[in-house]
Amino acid sequence: MAKVKKIFACSNCGATSPKWIGKCPHCGEWNTYIEEVISRDTVTESKDKSWRTQEKASKSKPVPLPEIEAGETTRLTTPDAELNRVLGGGIVPGSLVLIGGQPGIGKSTLLLQLAMHVPFTILYISGEESDEQIKMRADRIGGEAKNCYILSETNTSKILKHAQNLRPSLVIIDSIQTLSSPHIDSMPGSVSQVRECAGELQRFAKEEHIPVFIIGHITKEGSIAGPKLLEHIVDAVLQFEGDRNYTYRILRTIKNRFGSTDELGIYEMQASGLREVSNPSELLLSQKDEDLSGSAVAATIEGLRPMLIETQALVSTSVYSAPQRSATGFDLRRLGMLLAVLEKRAGLFFAQNDVFLNIAGGIRVDDPAIDLSIVAALISSLEDVAIPTDVCFAGEVGLSGEIRTVNRVEQRIQEANRLGFKEIYISKYNTKGLDTGRYDIEVKAVSKVQELYYALFK
């Protein structure tokens, strides 16, 4: 019998130590070492045998780069257009994709819905739910599910054996924290178990050219649970996020070796599952019967998709000695910078006012092109003058009060024109070489925040 030992593993990078260490010498993080029970002899012996077996069976040899023929990889296209967009055009064979998100946000629903509607064979591994529970959820979602196979198992050796026998086109693991490797004696979900199970799934995906989707839980800080090494092993990391008070769910790309990391997928949670939102602009714009102050529409771009979102601002007299500053869906520090620019360059004082900012729809936007709409919403609330609902904005605000250019301004104008807006304010420096006559929307150019103030409120 192998001798059982206790080790300490770093939850951030996966480094091990025979004793507890306050600061990890590998990644520099503090208080990340966790005690684990592990059979070091078993791991060493199994890895040694695996290495020797691979050494005998391996026929690969180093090849000069110019002699390698670059073949075009055929991606697996799914019926989910949003997922295809986020992955860069489809699923790459042999890839390892990690999907993280808060509990109850809809990760399992998203992948089970995918498994029930694809035309190729899928093996769905569930370590959290029984077959009956998955069947109940599948009946609620609906679909034929002729090619979906369910397996309730947590042992990686048995899972990979079933996958080799079935030879599916895609394997879904729900979730990585419930799996356990027979080569590790620690509890499922520990740092060493997650690292070992992810390594086995990676080897299986690369050797068999079968893509694997892994569901991962997140910590209370918002990061994916387990060692940071898990995110380095996988080929793509997707973040499924949203607010439970809203029906919208957003699928973001954090890492993607086969595509862009700027893409965004939007879903709407319904009783029958997740519905793809092909036109998010109409959903992210509020429906109002009358014009209200403090509201402005921004033309933004996420990945390759232009969309219009509503920015809402509320400026009110502060009853405290220190005015409040709050932002939802926007960087609070950038809000402070925009307020300072308005005070310094436009002579508008917010020092004695509470300022609240919200991006409608419960999404978070990092595009600097929404600066102009935020400035317009702040001025509108301060002056208590409503901005017409058929006016939108696209421009970045600099520290000197200038309106800076933004990329792909033509796509922003086209999206605003398609949705029936009458005017769009952009940077004067974006109009060089721009044919504004071919649009029905009126393009207005401004160079400073003072010009925007006089154009809208004077």
Image: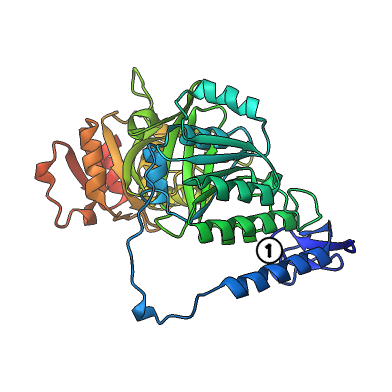
Left or right of 165, for residue 289: left
Query: Residue 452 location in percent, x, y?
Result: 29, 44
Residue 260 drawn above or below residue 321:
below
Query: Residue 429 location in percent, x, y?
Result: 23, 57
Asked which secondary structure carries label 1, the reply is loop
- Residue tagged by mark 1? 13
Left or right of 429, for residue 64: right
Q: Residue at x 58, y 25 (%)?
A: 135
Residue 195 drawn above or below residue 283:
below
Query: Residue 11 location in percent, x, y?
Result: 73, 58
**In the rendered image, is residue 456 in sight?**
yes
What is the three-letter code of the residue carrying label 1?
Cys
Seen as rendered, the residue at the extreme top is 289
Residue 173: which quarter of the image? Answer: top right
Closer to us: 174 or 370: 174
Query: Residue 167 location in percent, x, y?
Result: 51, 48
**In the rendered image, is residue 316 in sight?**
no
Left or right of 127, for residue 109: left
Q: Residue at x 44, y 54 (%)?
A: 93
Closer to us: 336 or 209: 209
Q: Residue at x 67, y 30 (%)?
A: 130
Residue 66 drawn above or below residue 169:
below
Q: Residue at x 64, y 29 (%)?
A: 131
